[in-house]
Amino acid sequence: MVSLKINHANIDSISHSFHKACSLAIKAWEAKNKERAEDATEIKLCCQIPPLSKMDNSLNSLKKCVRLSLSTNSIDRIGSLAGMINLRILSLGRNNIKKLERLEDVAGTLEQLWISYNQIASLDGLSCLTHLKVFYCSNNNIKSFTELSKIVSFSLTLHSFLLISCSIKI
């Protein structure tokens, strides 16, 4: 009979080894594209192996980035975007994000937010996005029709809004 002892430290150590930091993904992107990430206007860090688990401060160095794609990873919350002063398109689809937060940092520039296939239950956190034109939020956990009233603040600028497969009850 084999005895296996597992404690929380071992589990944390194992789970961290299956995820990649944004800083490592950015370095790999630079090597692949033969370009400095700080100078790029578009950065795609989609479907990383191992997946990204969090948005860390290394993203703040991407000051010229206009389009950031972090789709198909394991990100569970939106991290600081304070340094991303030119960001217009943020793609976070197919992650594990539960809450729309920390978007104030890009409120003056963000025009498109793609956040489908996450675990979002509330549209709180969107009111600051007064320049938003495209909002894709399908296949999340939004169940209340009253959540749709939270897009009123930017509805005049909104050109495209997708919210399907969310089991909204009227």
Image: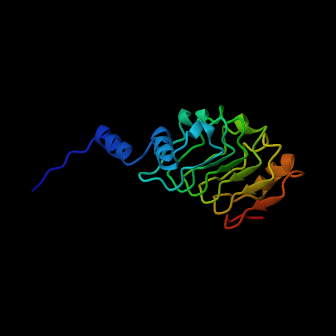
Seen as rendered, the residue at the extreme right is 156
Identify the residue at horizontal 41%, vertical 51% (top origin): 50
Look at the image and tell me in which quarter the N terminus lies: bottom left
Q: State the colouring used for the structure image.
A: rainbow
Q: Would you identify the image quadrant in which residue 162 lies?
A: bottom right
Q: Is residue 120 above or below residue 66?
A: below
Identify the residue at horizontal 37%, vertical 46% (top origin): 15
Seen as rendered, the residue at the extreme left is 1
Report the front residue among 107 and 14: 107
Report the front residue among 118 and 80: 80
Report the front residue among 22 and 140: 22
Q: Would you identify the image quadrant in which residue 140 lies?
A: bottom right
Identify the residue at horizontal 65%, vertical 54% (top origin): 115
The picture places residue 112, in percent across and down from the top left corner, at 74, 51
Look at the image and tell me in which quarter the C terminus lies: bottom right
Q: Would you identify the image quadrant in which residue 79 lies?
A: top right
The picture places residue 154, in percent across and down from the top left corner, at 85, 48
Taking the image as shown, residue 137 lies to the left or right of residue 18, namely: right
Taking the image as shown, residue 90 lies to the left or right of residue 127, namely: left
Q: Give the number of callouts.
A: 0
Taking the image as shown, residue 168 lies to the left or right of residue 75, namely: right
The picture places residue 44, in percent across and down from the top left corner, at 57, 51
The picture places residue 46, in percent across and down from the top left corner, at 54, 54
